[in-house]
Image (spheres, grey):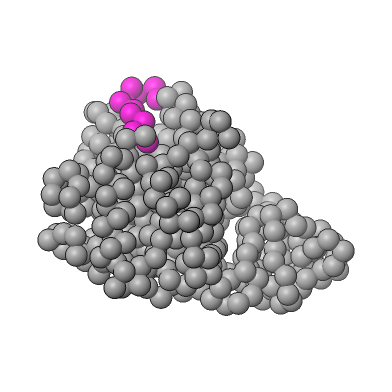
């Protein structure tokens, strides 16, 4: 634990009695009042997550657009100032280096938001694949990030600004100057989300994120706002059917089999394009599917997935109890055959010495 990192909110989490654990190289809160309680707060009211462990890389200069287009699978030319997109960056063989968000601030300024566990790897990858000479700045340590999620999120945040937050459309963002949002000297307010609920991501200077955390919890109390940890973040993203790096997405998976063909624009020239085009033409040998358990139990990463005859056809990548559905749900890779991938298909999960029946279901599990 000697090299474990902390976010600027670490003392706040301890003061709130959070259960902590190592995640992505950081000591992070897993839960405060309980995973189910926090999960339902996000579904019914609002939850506040510390996601300051995420990485941010600023890409600037005349070559910024060309660099990002070369780096990621999605089409950067679909962006305009104030718009964000979800995408991935891949190795030449199509393996996923990371999934990320790209924010276009101007024609010569982009912000890339990457996973905490991959910051060092990702930055090294970017530097090694920058023949056009774009300016790269890893500002992860300088940036604080909160995720305010739930049906009351916009109502809560609106109390801290005169800016019209309802004008921020899905996968768009605005930038606030000094004093325009809470007491922050600057802020990027975006509307993407990882919970399946409406909400905002609040990027502010690391030195100001603790004050913003306190202010939001104070003004949000009347609207049901609760601090939420990584436990609820995981159950929420799973109900929404979102992939997690290290589970559904790894360097040994590609975007086609991972169900990310929609962010893989083969008409652009990016690293791994030829390999992914070949996978698409030949057809992926496996495919990610969602499933709902028909018996009691919880699917865990690594559990074998069986067909109706009891043969192993794949493996679970993520699983949990759905607090909303009150049953087990999960994601996993199976052989890419209609008998295994069609919604309604019967499969089984090998859990030690027993098999739990399950049914393939297309995510999201909860809308």
Residue 222 image offset from top left, x and y in percent: 29, 73
Residue drawn at x 53%, y 54% as measured from the top left = 19
Q: Would you say 180 lies left or right of 198 here?
A: left
In the displayed structure image, the side of residue 185 where residue 195 appears, left or right: right
Residue 362, quarter of the rendered image: bottom right
* Viewer-closest of 242 and 351: 351
Residue at the image point whose x is 28% and y is 63% from the top: 218
Q: How many marks?
A: 0
Note whether residue 231 is visible: yes
Is residue 137 a member of the stretch shown in magenta? yes
- The relative height of residue 146 versus residue 221 in the rendered view (above or below) is above
Question: Residue at (30%, 47%) from the top-left corner?
Answer: 209
Q: Is residue 275 visible?
A: no
Q: Position of residue 312 (x, y in %)?
A: 81, 58
**Image vertical order of residue 170 relative to residue 245, above or below:** below
Identify the magenta region: 129-140
- Does residue 143 belong to the magenta stretch? no
The residue closer to the viewer here, 245 or 297, is 297
| Residue 214 quadrant | bottom left
Please tell me which residue lies in front, 235 or 317: 235
What's the residue at 59%, 46% (across, down)? 246
Q: Is 247 above or below relative to 234?
A: above
In the shown orientation, is residue 142 left or right of residue 20? left
Residue 86 percent location from the top left of the image: 41, 50
In the picture shown, does residue 35 fall above or below 315?
below
Placement of the N terminus among the 4 image quadrants: top right
Q: Position of residue 367 (x, y in %)?
A: 46, 74
- Relative placement, left or right, of 47 versus 221 is right
């Amino acid at each position: 634990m000697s090299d474990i990192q902390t976010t600027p909110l670490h003392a706040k989490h301890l003061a709130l009695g959070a259960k902590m654990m190592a995640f992505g190289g950081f000591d992070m809160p897993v839960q405060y009042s309980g995973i189910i309680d926090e999960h339902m707060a996000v579904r019914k009211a609002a939850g506040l997550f510390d996601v300051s462990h995420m990485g941010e890389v600023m890409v600037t200069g005349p070559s910024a657009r060309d660099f990002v287009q070369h780096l990621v699978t999605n089409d950067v030319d679909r962006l305009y100032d104030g718009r964000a997109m979800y995408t991935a960056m891949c190795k030449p063989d199509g393996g996923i280096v990371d999934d990320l968000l790209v924010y276009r601030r101007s024609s010569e300024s982009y912000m890339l938001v990457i996973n905490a566990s991959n910051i060092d790897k990702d930055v090294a990858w970017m530097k090694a694949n920058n023949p056009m000479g774009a300016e790269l700045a890893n500002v992860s340590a300088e940036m604080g990030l909160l995720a305010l999620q739930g049906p009351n999120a916009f109502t809560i945040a609106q109390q801290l600004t005169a800016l019209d937050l309802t004008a921020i459309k899905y996968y768009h963002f605005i930038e606030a100057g000094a004093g325009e949002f809470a007491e922050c000297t600057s802020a990027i307010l975006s509307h993407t989300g990882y919970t399946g609920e409406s909400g905002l991501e609040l990027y502010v200077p690391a030195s100001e994120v603790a004050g913003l955390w306190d202010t939001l919890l104070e003004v949000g109390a009347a609207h049901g706002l609760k601090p939420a940890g990584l436990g609820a973040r995981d159950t929420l993203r799973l109900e929404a059917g979102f992939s997690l790096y290290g589970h559904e997405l790894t360097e040994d998976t590609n975007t086609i089999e991972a169900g990310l063909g929609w962010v893989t624009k083969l008409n652009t020239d990016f690293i791994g394009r030829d390999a992914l085009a070949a996978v698409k033409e030949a057809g992926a040998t496996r495919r990610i599917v969602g499933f709902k358990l028909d018996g009691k139990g919880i699917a865990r990463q690594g559990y074998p997935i069986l067909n109706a005859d009891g043969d192993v056809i794949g493996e679970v990548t993520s699983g949990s109890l759905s607090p909303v559905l009150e049953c087990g749900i999960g994601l996993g890779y199976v052989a890419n055959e209609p008998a295994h991938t069609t919604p309604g298909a019967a499969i089984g999960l090998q859990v030690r010495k027993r098999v739990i029946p399950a049914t393939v279901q297309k995510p999201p599990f909860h809308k």
